[in-house]
């Protein structure tokens, strides 16, 4: 069946149900198999906030592969050791679309050295741009960023690689309109070639349950990829999860894999009465 003329949700239901009937489920044996067809230059939507709800196993498998030139969309860039950090160390990422970049010194250096392009987006806007993609909404108006550089453009997105810190690529202006006396700017939906999410529990049909704050951006991201890959802490047979407990229906998930090595990582430890230490970018923001 051709995709043209079909509503997005109906197309996904048709094709994914057929795939499920052929294979007997969506579970795969390993994370390496789950990411096997991600090519160089792909656009990845990656779940998580800080180091919570991050698909660490999928990211490790991608880092061990030969892909390069990735565009990554995520609320944050992790740390040098966790989350997206190792992919920066391996120089597999060419562009980042995200919101918070204050804990990763490797990312900071690559950005200032002109090795990667960075598009900064207000976090609520970023989440809505991905949710809109999953809902089939191509663009929407928001008051967030109106009257700032987000609207006017001119934010540095890429520096020269010769060490001069000359800005080579700047953000572009947004279209603006006034509704009910308030100014709004137009933001486009963000679609991905692949969406990588992490859930607490999932079944072999791809139904997902997130736990507490690990839910964060994962539900929206799961709907916005052409191919959605989920890793879970516990993989159970189809029918084991009460439908009322499902956060992401299996219609949105193409592959699911059992993850391992779920260490409880604290991104930035702060103890009462002490000052925590972050990266140079983070300290500069604190001082400002």
Image: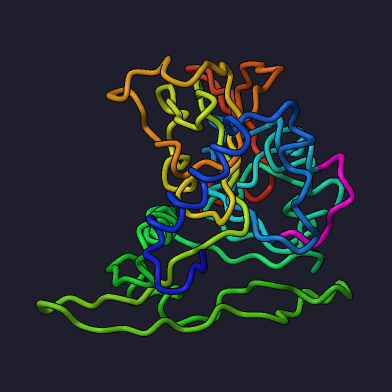
Q: Tell me if residue 48 comes above or below residue 92 in the rendering.
A: above
Give the percent coordinates (x, y) of residue 175.
37, 85
Q: Is residue 71 left or right of residue 235?
A: right
The reply, left or right, for residue 237 in relation to residue 133 is right
Name which residue lies at 47% across and 40% down: 218
Main secondary-structure element of the magenta-colored stretch: loop
Q: Is residue 236 left or right of residue 246?
A: right
Q: Classify residue 264 by image quadrant.
A: top right
Q: Which residues are magenta?
A: 63-70
- Scheme of image coloration: rainbow
Compared with 285, 30 (above or below) is: above
Using the image, determine if residue 116 lies above or below residue 58: below
Give the residue at x 47% y 73%. Answer: 4
Q: Position of residue 191 (x, y in %)?
A: 52, 62
Question: Compared to 9, does 146 lie above or below?
Answer: below
Residue at image location 79% in from the left, 69% down from the top: 114
Q: Position of residue 213 (x, y in %)?
A: 42, 28
From the viewer's side, name the closer residue of 88 and 153.
88
Question: On the image, which quarter does residue 21 sit in?
Answer: top right
The image shows residue 271 at horizontal and vertical percentages of: 53, 17
| Residue 245 within the magenta-colored segment of the rendering | no
Q: Nearer the viewer, residue 284 or 189?
A: 189
Residue at 52% from the left image edge and 41% from the top image edge: 253
């Amino acid at each position: 069946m051709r995709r043209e003329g079909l509503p997005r949700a109906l197309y996904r239901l048709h094709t994914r149900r057929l795939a499920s009937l052929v294979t007997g489920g969506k579970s795969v044996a390993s994370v390496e198999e789950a990411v096997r067809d991600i090519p160089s230059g792909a656009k990845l939507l990656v779940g998580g906030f800080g180091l919570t709800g991050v698909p660490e196993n999928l990211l490790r498998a991608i880092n061990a592969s030969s892909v390069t030139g990735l565009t990554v969309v995520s609320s944050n860039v992790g740390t040098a050791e966790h989350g997206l950090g190792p992919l920066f160390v391996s120089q597999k990422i060419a562009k980042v679309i995200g919101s918070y970049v204050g804990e990763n010194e490797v990312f900071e250096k690559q950005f200032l050295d002109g090795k990667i392009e960075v598009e900064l987006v207000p976090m609520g806007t970023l989440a809505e741009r991905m949710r809109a993609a999953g809902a089939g909404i191509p663009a929407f108006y928001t008051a967030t960023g109106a009257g700032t550089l987000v609207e006017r453009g001119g934010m540095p997105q890429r520096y020269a690689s010769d060490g001069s810190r000359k800005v080579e690529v700047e953000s572009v202006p947004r279209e603006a309109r006034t509704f009910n006396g308030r100014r709004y700017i137009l933001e486009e939906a963000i679609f991905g070639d692949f969406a990588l999410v992490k859930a607490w529990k999932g079944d072999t049909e791809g139904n997902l349950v997130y736990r507490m704050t690990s839910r964060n951006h994962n539900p929206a991201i799961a709907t916005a990829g052409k191919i959605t890959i989920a890793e879970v802490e516990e993989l159970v047979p189809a029918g084991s999860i009460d439908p009322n407990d499902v956060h992401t229906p299996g219609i949105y998930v193409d592959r699911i894999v059992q993850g391992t090595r779920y260490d409880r990582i604290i991104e930035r430890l702060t103890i009462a009465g002490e000052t925590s230490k972050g990266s140079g970018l983070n300290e500069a923001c604190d001082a400002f």
